[in-house]
Image: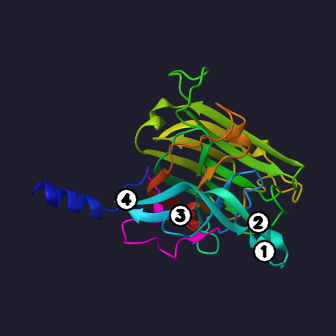
Amino acid sequence: MSIALVALALAGAAPEPPGAGWQLAWSDEFDGPRIDPAKWGFEQDCWGGGNDERQCYTRSRRNAAIAGGALVITARRERISGPSLPPALRGGAAPEPVTRDFSSARLTTRGKAAWQYGRIEVRAQLPQGQGTWPAIWMLPETDAYGPWAASGEIDILETVNLGVPCKDCPGGREDRILGTLHFGGKWPANRQAGAEQHHPAVLDGFHVFAIEWTPQVITWFVDGQPYARRQAHEWSTTGSANPGAPFDKPFHLVLNLAIGGRLPEGRGLGGVAADGYPRQMLVDWVRVWQRPAPKASEVD
């Protein structure tokens, strides 16, 4: 078989399960001509995520598009205006406009796909530079236990300021990956439990970021290797006494590239670098795996 035919066969091959018993529940390989509206919606606001971020999120192809078999989320340095709050926070009021210095995109499967338990994998290449804040994360499909963070948040992967000088990093450049749970009560009574791991490899190329989520444990992985683990006794919510709550409900997926905000601006060199734009986050694929529930005959 020629090299071209081998490449074609591989491109059409079914995704390889991450282990025995996993079945593919949902995926996007980003191999079509445009972002699939049946799978993804767009946030469109300049709110800043409650973190004082500096971007307006748009649905423009200049900020999110399919190119080269990958989803490309592009942050641009440009003056742009949009709603100061998302619809959920406006209470039916007309949006008030605000102007920011950066545009970017935030995609979500809310209202289109959500999952309770499983293994969520995302293969991505991350942007570098002071003030960059790419994230792969999950939010509850409904606020069953109350407003954020009583109903939970699962951060599969965050990085801030990748590649900038870092005296505490092994290679002298920022290389930490973050995996975090948010829970507890409604802000400001929220709590969190997370981990940071030096992983110099993320400074180059694509990597697979994942969680395995069960009723008892959430484990974080990078390139197939676990690096953090949280157990159900470590989380809780003021909205329920259920031992698995709030992480016992369906959550949807969010992909975004933020610019600025309290977390990145308070680390590294401080603030937001004005050069190096556009900056891009590339996502090769997203895959959600689940194990089927045991049959009645298999349960003791």
Which mark's residue is nearer the viewer, 4 or 1? 1
Which of the marked residues, 2 or 1, is nearer the chain's N terminus? 2
Residue at image x 49%, y 51%? 278
Circle 2 packing at 10 Å, graded few (<14), some (14-19), many (20+), is many
- Residue 29 visible in the picture: no
Which of the marked residues, 3 or 4, is nearer the chain's N terminus? 4
Residue annotated with mark 1: 95
Amino acid type, callout 1: Pro
Which mark's residue is nearer the viewer, 2 or 3? 2
Q: Which mark is residue 84?
A: 2
Q: Nearer the viewer, residue 25 or 136?
A: 136
Which mark's residue is nearer the viewer, 2 or 4? 2
Report if the CB atoms under discs 4 and 1 are less than 8 Å apart: no
Distance between the Cα atoms at labels 2 and 1? Answer: 7 Å
Residue annotated with mark 4: 15
**What x and y, as percent, mark residue 267?**
68, 33
Residue at image x 74%, y 40%? 193
Report if the CB atoms under discs 2 and 1 are less than 8 Å apart: yes
Amino acid type, callout 2: Ser
What residue span does the magenta drawing correspond to? Answer: 19-43
Chief SS of the magenta region: loop
